[in-house]
Amino acid sequence: MVIRAAEDAVADMAQARAEGPASEARSETTPMSDAVDHDGPAATRLVIFGRQGAGKGTQAARLVEHYGVIHLSTGDMFRAAVADGTELGQQVGPIMESGGLVSDELTIAIVRERLAADDIVADGFVLDGFPRTPAQAEALLAMLGDGGLHAVIELEVPLDEVTNRMKARAREDDTDESIAKRLALYDTETVPTIDWFRERGLVVTVDGLGSEDEVAERMTDAIDKALAGR
Ligand code: ADP
């Protein structure tokens, strides 16, 4: 109940900021359509998915380099809020600690606000860690509009390979069981979200085996093809 009230407050704040005097002031110098229009020709807008141990972080950094987009990680955004002790941080801290997911409502409100910022509109983005549920995916496409999202990258690495990679870098308190559990979450939580995008023809599956450079080249080739067809 308390959390719900707080979420509403954050959603209201985001809404108020979107509609309030600040954006009115900005619209005097910048046409409103420029402030929120994600259909500009230059900016590339991507989502990246991959199991833990698939090299998602490394390849997201390559996308930033290659396309000049901004890396947006909801995990990083939430961790920063916790570190700063903001109202948002106080709400999401305990949820993250317990290994749960932050509510769709709150997560979507945070992303919506960030995606409206001038730097993101101008440079584009690669989203990492969002969307994580079909409801979040639906909200994202609604925010961006038709053709607003260019590609969804699925970095594919076989389960036994990521299991071995995770074991190799595991902390001492990581057991085979806890690794298997974390990897299984991807199948129950994330795969349905990827499938949701697949049904809409947006998914580009990239073989994640090989050197960093090889994977990066495969990935940008596949994205370029998708971008050429937009
Ligand atoms: P991990 O890959 O370890 O789950 P992330 O950095 O992606 O790490 O996210 C850390 C935590 O932040 C998650 O465990 C979850 O509590 C929260 N979180 C991040 N993104 C989302 C999201 N899209 N929806 C709900 N909760 C999220």
Image (tube, rainbow, N blue to C red):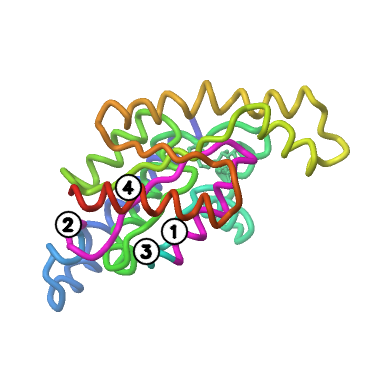
Picture disc at residue 13: none
Ligand 1 location (quadrant): top right
Horizontal and vertical percent position of residue 92: 56, 43
In the orientation shown, which residue stands out farthest toward the bottom? 29
Q: Is residue 180 magenta?
A: no
Say which element carries label 4: helix
Q: Which quadrant of the view contains residue 200?
A: top left
User: What residue is disc 4 on?
Assistant: 12
Report if residue 61 lies within the magenta region.
Answer: yes
Which residue is denoted by mark 1 in the rendering? Answer: 63
State the CA–CA distance, disc 2 to disc 4: 26 Å
* Disc 2 residue type (three-letter): Asp
Q: Residues within 10 Å of mark 4 (few under 14, many from 20)?
A: few
- What's the residue type where badge 4 is placed? Asp
Where is residue 84, by image quadrant? bottom right
- For mark 1, give the secondary structure: helix
Q: CA distance from mark 2 to mark 1?
A: 19 Å
Which sits earlier in the primary sequence, circle 2 or circle 4?
4
Residue marked by disc 3: 67
Label 2 vs 1, first from the N-terminus:
2
Pointer 2 residue:
39
Tell me whether the residue at label 1 lies in contact with that at label 3, contact meaning CB atoms closer than 8 angstroms: yes
